[in-house]
Image (cartoon, rainbow, N blue to C red):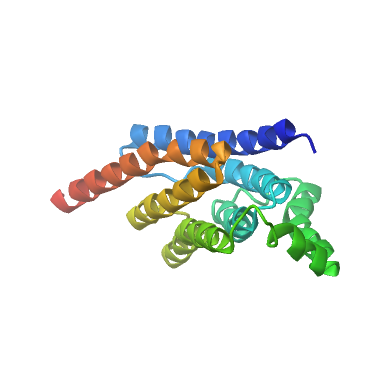
Amino acid sequence: MNPYLVFLIGIAAQILFSGRLLVQWIASERAKKVLSPTLFWQMSMAASFMLCVYGWLRNDFAIIAGQLISYYIYIWNLRAKKAWDTMPAVLRAVVSYLPVVAVCWFAVDWRETAEHLFRQENIPGWLIVFGTVGQFTFTLRFIYQWRYSARAGESLLPTTFWLISLLGSGMIIAYAIIRRDPVLILGQSTGFVVYLRNIMISRKAARRESAR
């Protein structure tokens, strides 16, 4: 595939990811507390799908692995916000099962899939491992968010979520610099300000609550 088209898909996904952070940030600034808007999760789901496609076209297992896990957490949050059932049934079915079908499709010829994602002469094995660890660290924030929200009975974005975001994002940026991937560098760099600002908003809100 044309490399420019591949990067266009990746950039479009990162624009959606950056846009979701902007939506969440603006809503939180207005409310003076960290919010978890429905649009944030809808944009996350669309961007995650596009980034998986980009990861496959770039032969990048690290990208795909991280996105497949967080994808279904996005759906859980949409359910928690009562927004999932408002989507058309056909769309819900496609969104739910398409990743599963894709994984099964690639598993049929797993040797070719492994060759495509892992055995690349221009990418050392240690870099694939480092990138995968970075992606899983970044994805861990959503696993934590899901557990935290499930216990609270609602979709929330706690302070620890943003702290893990900073750590994982830093690792992915280092990985992207080594791989010379401008899409990942651009996408991750824009999130740093939002992560830091949400930590500040969260702590200010906590101080206001404790002062009452």
Residue 189 coordinates in the image, percent (x, y):
44, 38
Instruction: Using the image, determine if residue 13 lies above or below residue 52.
Output: above
The residue nearer to you, when weighing 177 against 149, is 177
The residue shown at (39%, 56%) is 164
Residue 61 coordinates in the image, percent (x, y):
64, 58
The residue shown at (71%, 31%) is 4
Residue 39 coordinates in the image, percent (x, y):
56, 39
Q: Is residue 3 visible?
A: yes
The residue shown at (34%, 34%) is 29
The residue shown at (69%, 57%) is 120
Left or right of 43, for residue 165: left
Instruction: Using the image, determine if residue 129 lies above or below residue 178.
Output: below
Q: Is residue 86 visible?
A: no
Residue 96 coordinates in the image, percent (x, y):
73, 57
The residue nearer to you, when weighing 6 against 139, is 6
The number of numbered discs placed on residues in the rendered structure image is: 0
Tell me the quarter of the image containing the N terminus: top right
Left or right of 204, for residue 192: right
Residue projecting furthest to the front? 121
Where residue 107 sits, quadrant-wise, is bottom right
